[in-house]
Image (cartoon, grey):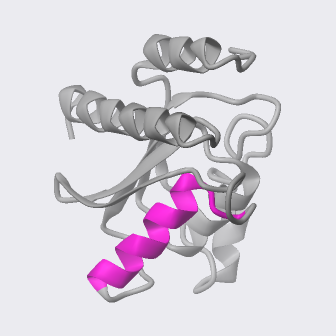
Amino acid sequence: MNSGHHEKFIRRCMELAQESLDAGDNPFGALVVKEGQIIAEARNSAVRHDMTDHAEIIAMRSAKEILGTPDLSGCTLYSNCEPCPMCSFMIREQKIKEVVFALRTPHMGGYSRWDILQDKGLARYEPAFATPPNVITGVLEKEAAEQFEKAGWTIHRI
């Protein structure tokens, strides 16, 4: 997919993040996309509902229900911020083929800090974990950072 598509989907993640903020939660939004079409989208609801209700996990749960399969190997996950370790393990278990995000989180990310998304050793445990997804970082990074900073979050960029 070209960078214009990635930007379009990251912008939607940022809109969802703003909706999350407006609802009193943390500024995270995520999409699951297949063949250029949004299958599922979600905003964070961990603060208000369940601490595991990160946008990425909610979007993957919805995509599995909509597609009728736990195998999301034909899908791309988009997020305005790097998935955390919990979300990264779920991405690997759901066999997401590509992950695209705006901001890295070097203090807590499942790619920058903990290397879960790219850990080739996890693939030894198939069918539980798939091969590492393709990871694209920094899409609309500046805009996403501004959104976080405007919301009062401290951003530690690499």
Up/down of 148 relative to 45, above or below: above
Q: Position of residue 114 (x, y in %)?
A: 79, 45
Q: Which of the 4 image quarters holds residue 63?
A: bottom left
| Magenta span | 52-67
**Which residue is more in the foreground, 5 or 46?**
46
Q: On the rendered structure, is 117 left or right of 69? A: right
Q: Position of residue 146 (x, y in %)?
A: 53, 11
Residue at the image position 53 percent from the left and 56 percent from the top: 56
Q: Position of residue 136 (x, y in %)?
A: 45, 35
Most common SS among magenta residues: helix
Q: Which of the 4 image quarters holds residue 130?
A: bottom right
Q: Position of residue 25 (x, y in %)?
A: 63, 43
Residue at the image position 38 percent from the left and 52 percent from the top: 31
Image quarter (top left, top right, bottom left or bottom right) of the N terminus: top left
Q: On the rendered structure, is 35 left or right of 98? A: left
Up/down of 106 relative to 64, above or below: above
Up/down of 64 relative to 75, above or below: below
